[in-house]
Amino acid sequence: MPSLPCYPLILDRVKKGASILDVGCCFGQDLRFLTADGAPTREMYATDIVPDFWDLGYDLFRDKERFHAWFIAADILDPESSSLRELQGRIDICLVNQVFHLFSREKQFTMAKHLISMSRPGSCIVGWHVGSNQGKALPISTQTGGPDGSAGSETRLFHNHMSWRELWQEVGHTTGTQWEVETWMQSLQEWGYEKEDTAWMGPGAMGFEFICRRTDGTAASARI
């Protein structure tokens, strides 16, 4: 996460008391980057569909006495999740790393609406995932190498700049919110990927970083 262009501003805002939610947190390593750089944990939240990851994070980093972020086991694709309901309208920064690229556009749209429900004016949604300079959906069977090589009905959408902006324009219209979107793309080799890791995607696989700023009812001074 520290490689994100907006990381210094995120760190500054969390240090000043902004709330942050790490979606698909796994071991909680990204929130720990912030704490290592001096951010307090009192307004840190994390969620993952696999709760065992959070406990393993404490085993890995050996910091249970120091790291006090709040963990919530939940499915971010379930907008009716009672576990996350208490965070509605309370989150200033949603951190979403390596999550969107796991799903179809329909599921991405559902997830984006859920994230927006937890945001408020001035919030931002920030993170990174694997994208494609062609902006394309691929059947999951292409990656898993199904027995007959056929394309299944389930797909994963890998965004480029245009398709990502279109998603947030549509979800903003649906939710009555406004979003300013900024994106960056770079070689996956710069992230440590080997070419064979994404060979199944065909040409055009790229690293995709983003920040979506909620601008409705927002003073410029409150934004990242």
Image (cartoon, helix red, strand yellow):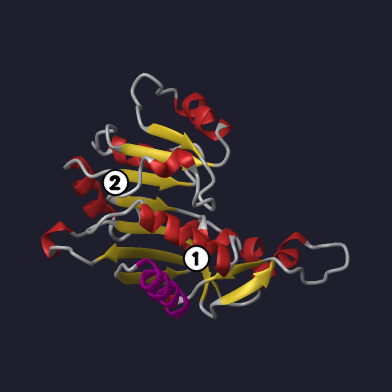
Q: Residue 69: percent from the left, percent from the top?
A: 36, 32
Q: Quadrant of residue 184?
A: bottom left
Q: CA distance from mark 2 to mark 1?
A: 21 Å
Can residue 127 be seen here? yes
In the image, is residue 53 above or below residue 132?
above
SS of the residue under disc 1: helix
The circle drawn on residue 90 is: 2
**Residue range highlighted in magenta:** 162-175
Query: How busy is the neighbourhood of tag 1: few (under 14 within 10 Å), some, or many (20 plus)?
Result: some
Quadrant in the picture for the C terminus: bottom left
Identity of the residue drawn at 54% across and 29% down: 56
Can residue 128 be seen here? no
Identity of the residue drawn at 33% across and 68% down: 176
Residue wearing tag 1: 109
Q: Quadrant of residue 217?
A: bottom left
Q: Nearer the viewer, residue 54 or 70?
A: 70
Q: Residue 7: percent from the left, percent from the top?
A: 29, 53
Question: Magenta segment: does it hold 5?
Answer: no
Identity of the residue drawn at 71% across and 63% down: 143
Query: Which of disc 1 and disc 2 is earlier in sequence?
Result: 2
Q: Nearer the viewer, residue 55 or 63?
A: 55
Which secondary structure class fits the magenta region best?
Answer: helix
Identity of the residue drawn at 66% across and 75% down: 202
Q: Quadrant of residue 148?
A: bottom right
